[in-house]
Amino acid sequence: MQVDRSCARSGALLTWMLLLLSTLSTGAGGQGGTHQSIPPSVVKLWASAFGGEMKSISAKYSGSQLLQKKYKEFERAVQVEEIDGLHLVKKLAKNMEEMFHKKAQAMKRLVEAAEEAHLQHEEDPDLQYEYFNAVLINEVNEEGDNVELGGEFILQPNDHFNNLSVNLSLSVVQVPTNMYNKDSAIVNGVYWSEALNKVFVDNFERDPSLIWQYFGSAKGFFRQYPGIKWKPDEHGVIAFDCRNRKWYIQAATSPKDVVILVDVSGSMKGLRLTIARQTVSSILDTLGDDDFFNIIAYNEELHYVEPCLNGTLVQADVTNKDHFREHLDKQEMNSWACCEMLLLTEAFNFL
């Protein structure tokens, strides 16, 4: 049976240390509490032995000797140059400014193209238009024919997009599962936003460092470039709605302070309570990190859902919103509702 020498060596070192500590303990606690001094020369010997052992182990496992050897191999070819820190910072700042300028210009071109296309479009409630639906592309029916809003959509793996299969010539349109793909408002919006395709391609050619470009509509559809196939979850649902995304909400609205009043009187039991909780949860979903809120529950008297935060507003981050949802679920329904004027007065006192 073979034993790793390094393990045996480490074990021996540990045993030696335990014996040393045992010796020191015995020496310090002898009969009558007398203290036995250890000669300095012995302590130096122990320290030297321990230090040598630690140096040997660290040298073996740290790779320091190999690093020194490699450094000496390149020592003659390596030159030390003094760097002007101020010049370096200015160069980095200039590069960052140019990068952000390129991104801003790409966005500006998209905005101008979208505004122009929308201005030139006339709404047609009877418009029929086939577009590439992100979920339905390359899907076929039982007869082997392309499904409606599907069609053949060429996809190729691309390293720039984490090796995902994409189409660099066209964009796709995603519509939330709970919306009708061929609703008149959707079809009209998809039709005029088709003009963004050439701008997407032009932006990517001008700045190959760009990744995803997209357009989120107030109607609910989401146009994404480059085109990619979306896959629903195991229930056949895609819950994504661009209007609920943080970037959309922050762009569409300004920071706000919100106080939510919730009736928890006896009349709210059953389905009414479920609807009220869901409504509050939906309101919280629309709030972003730049928003502040609080929730006041009331029956015969008013009280804050989170007692520790009376009369103040908290940031609408994910943690706080989830925390308030939990407290709201614990509210008990009883008694009757108090005066509305009292509620409004309390709410406006800290808005």
Image: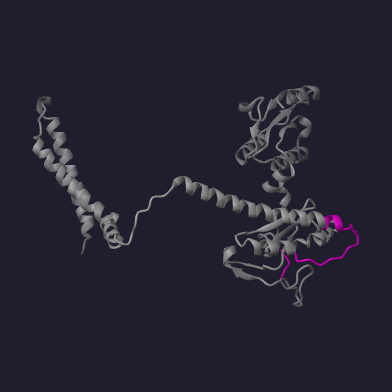
x, y percentage for residue 130? Answer: 81, 67
x, y percentage for residue 349? Answer: 72, 23
Tell me: 192 left or right of 332. Answer: right
User: Would you say residue 334 sits in the magenta stretch?
Assistant: no
Which image quarter is the C terminus in? top right
Q: Which corner quadrant of the image does residue 46 belong to? A: top left
x, y percentage for residue 343? Answer: 76, 25
Q: Which corner quadrant of the image does residue 60 belong to? A: bottom left
91 or 159, which lies in front? 91
Q: Write the start and end of the magenta stretch as one range.
A: 117-137
Identify the coloring.
one colour
Say whether residue 240 is visible: no
Q: Which corner quadrant of the image does residue 265 belong to? A: top right
199 or 242, which lies in front? 199
Say whether residue 284 is visible: yes
State the residue at coordinates (41%, 50%).
83
Tell me: 214 left or right of 21. Answer: right
Identify whether 122 is placed above or below 274: below
327 or 87, which lies in front? 87
Q: How many marks?
A: 0
